[in-house]
Image (cartoon, rainbow, N blue to C red):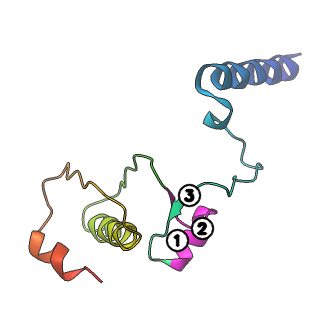
Amino acid sequence: DNMSKNTNLIADTVEAVKKSHGDESISTLNSQPKTNADVIPTGLLSLDKALGIGGIPQGRILEIYGPESSGKTTLTLEIISQAQKAKMNCAFIDAEHSLDPDYAKKTRN
């Protein structure tokens, strides 16, 4: 029947992705996140809790996406501030060319 064909197709696809990209490259909604990853707190307790691991994963490229004036730069600068407090190096790539250096200086804690 079609349901079992779809189930098999999904299982085969998941296995192919894991084989090509590693076991942690795909997960299901009911799987528990691994908590042994090093994280950088966002500075927002509610967001850290919602992310499920207490912040953003350290050592990964992160894209913060959203509409204009939604707080992307402020959130990014806060995360960078948290990382710098932990003596980490950070890079800010401003694809929108909208970073105001004076604003960035004011947001430092």
Question: In the rendered structure, are the residues bearing label 1 and label 2 in contact, judged by CB atoms less than 8 Å apart?
Answer: yes
Q: CA distance from mark 1 to mark 3?
A: 16 Å
- The region drawn magenta spans 45-57
Residue nearest the viewer, comparing 7 with 63: 63
Image quadrant where one finds the C terminus: bottom left
User: Which comes before the other along the chain, label 1 or label 3?
Assistant: 3
The local crowd at label 3, few if under 14, some if 14 to 19, many if 20 or more residues have their Cα within 10 Å, is: few
Seen in the picture, residue 1 relative to 84 is either above or below; the reply is above
- Badge 1 amino acid: Leu
**Which residue is painted at 45% across and 49% down in the image?**
59
Element at label 1 = helix
User: Which comes before the other along the chain, label 2 or label 3?
Assistant: 3
**Among all residues in the image, which is located at the extreme front?**
87
Q: x and y percent of residue 88 in the render? A: 37, 62
Q: Which residue is mark 2?
A: 50
Q: x and y percent of residue 54 in the render? A: 58, 68
Q: Quadrant of residue 102?
A: bottom left
**Magenta stretch: includes residue 39:** no
**Magenta stretch: includes residue 54:** yes
Q: x and y percent of residue 77 in the render? A: 29, 69
**Which residue is painted at 31% across and 64% down in the image?**
72
Image quadrant where one finds the N terminus: top right
**Which residue is painted at 60% across and 19% down in the image?**
20
**Which residue is painted at 48% across and 54% down in the image?**
58
Q: x and y percent of residue 82 in the render? A: 39, 72
Q: Which residue is mark 3?
A: 38
